Amino acid sequence: SSQKETRAFEAEVSQVLRLMIHAMYSNKEVFLRELVSNASDAIDKLRFEALADPELRAEQGEAAIALSVDREARTLTIADTGIGMSRQEVTESIGTIARSGTREFLERLSGDQQADAQLIGQFGVGFYSAFIVAERVVLTTRRAGERDAVRWESTGDGEYTLEAAEKAQAGTEIVLHLREDEDEFLEPMRLETVVRRYSDHISFPIYLVEEASEEGQEPTRRQLNEASALWTRSASEISAEDYTEFYRHVARAFDEPLAHVHTTIEGRLKFTLLLYVPSARPFDFAMAGQERQGGVKLYVKRVFIMDEAEMFLPRYLRFVRGVVDSDDLPLNVSRELLQDNRVVRTMRQTAIKKVLERLETLSQDAEAYGTFWNAFGPILKEGVIEEPERKEQIAALLRFASTSPATEDAPEAQQVRLADYIERMRPGQEAIYYITADSYASALASPHLEIFKARGVEVLVLTDAVDEWLVNHLSEFQGKALRSVTRGALDLESLGKDAEAAEEESAVEDAAEEAEAASEAERAPWLGAVEELLGEQVREVRLSQRLTDSPSCLVREEWEIGERMRRILEQAGE
Ligand code: ADP
Ligand code: MG
């Protein structure tokens, strides 16, 4: 309809808006980065849709983003020649917060200003960041291919209005009515600095349009950025800041990436990969697999083709963000065509190889790798299951909590490599022992560990949901079997004894064995009684040498499924 209508933001939007305006105040210039980033995405989308639609091509105009100021009105305008939005798209995209993590984000706020500010910085709010500097935002947009434009207007305090509008050029124009103290964003120099800092990597020209000094003259415009696709530039010309800002743009993320891979392959196929390892999980990452696929942005010959192209990476690397650009794929590729494609397969293999190599180098930096591991460790573990050919390589990248922790003040931290464990194995020890549990504390309290403690044998403590599957698929590492402490008859005879201790102990043991034989005979009737009492619930009641403190414990046979696996299957209704 052409009538003006007033609508309310979703409750969460107002809440996030209020928080953001306060929390982001020290870093308010990021609003420009967000609006320019959206403008660039919109131009990408129009170029893509125009590939298949001559009518849209006619509407395209120069692909560019223009900043202009009106000193008298105290407004800053950001205009793009992108895809624009229909009325419905406006309500869907900016009348609500589309981000699926909003609720979770609000739940995580603690009320502690400093901690919350950091959280908000991570969460990011895209378009709404306009309200950090603007007391009123007027957005006029026309979707390419549609006749009617629409105007959206809001002061950011709970409501917005929508009405029909006119707009000659397809695209979006956003007028920011600046708050009282924000005059700095009327200064060309200030705008230029901010664009260079955050948006230099944008592939399209960003112009600063300046009013003519003399009446009747045309305004002049000046290009502020380099305007070539960042991944096509050589690494030596790209600063660390540019890499970071480009990551934030493509990943729609707000963290500092931990590492990147930037490589161009020129052989039978030509392609470029610019892939990043993030340092933090996006808020909606937990829902990956359902809603958000992850994946990279696909470009073909510098033309944007699609977001979240997940076929270029395996599932276990779904945290990787970035772009891939192929010279060999046709511009009209579809998702279906990409599913089984020779070019994609080659690019994917290269991407996997490069990312795993990069993780290997990253792992030499314990702190950085710790950050990576805390965010994505359980996901990387899936690689052992998903890609048996690279099992050993991926297993080398895994880190575990252990009964011999690397750090005393955080014993549950996952920091032990399988190779570390093997190095520390006791003489005579043949297997890598692990225990699976819901938590580090409950694992440590397990009676199964008593004999290992007594013998000074390290045990890996596995507490992630994926671990039960992991150990099912990782039966050995560097020739050493992985063995659960709860399974089967443990050969603990010679375990953990070095030569000297062994001699000393043997005397003690002879005595113990005698006592044991005696006690076995003595206790046979008692064991029988317990067996009878427990009936169907147990297969056998045995006297054990494993326990040093606890009176009894449950063990399972070698072939039985693990405890957690059993519970998972039960939950799944099997
Ligand atoms: P994000 O960019 O992460 O999706 P934003 O809050 O920045 O989140 O933007 C929300 C949505 O609004 C975008 O996904 C897009 O659909 C729409 N949008 C924002 N700015 C523009 C624009 N300049 N042109 C077209 N669509 C836009
Ligand atoms: Mg955005």
Image (cartoon, rainbow, N blue to C red):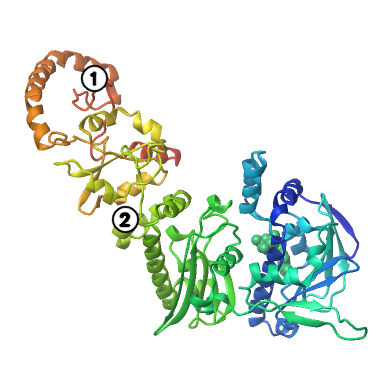
Ranked by sequence position, the earlier of labels 2 and 1 is 2
Whether 244 is drawn above or below 305: the answer is: above
Residue 189 falls in which quadrant of the image? bottom right
Please tell me in which quarter of the rendered image ligand 1 is found.
bottom right
Q: Position of residue 547 (x, y in %)?
A: 23, 25
Q: Nearer the viewer, residue 266 or 333?
A: 266
Q: Is residue 184 at all visible to an observer of this figure?
A: yes
Q: Is mark 2 within 8 Å of ligand 1?
A: no
Q: Nearer the viewer, mark 2 or mark 1?
A: 2
What SS does tag 1 mark?
A: helix
User: Circle 1 sits on which residue?
Assistant: 531
Q: Residues within 10 Å of mark 1 (few under 14, many from 20)?
A: some
Identify which amino acid the numbered label 1 is placed on. Answer: Glu
**Type of amino acid under label 2:** Ala
- Under circle 2, the secondary element is loop
Q: How many marks?
A: 2
Q: Which mark is residue 396?
A: 2
Q: Quadrant of the N terminus?
A: bottom right
- From this viewpoint, which residue is outermost toward the right? 215
Name the residue rendered at 53%, 61% in the picture. Answer: 294
Q: Is residue 182 left or right of residue 296?
A: right
Cα separation between marks 2 and 1: 44 Å
Q: Nearer the viewer, residue 6 or 557?
A: 6
Quarter holding the C terminus is top left
| Furthest residue in direction front, as rendered | 189
How many residues crowd around disc 2 within 10 Å: few (fewer than 14), some, or many (20 or more)? some
Q: Is 507 situated left or right of 213 in this image?
A: left
- Measuring from the top left, give residue 162's x and y in whole percent: 85, 61
Please identify the quarter of the rendering in which residue 342 is found. bottom left
Left or right of 104 in this view: 553? left
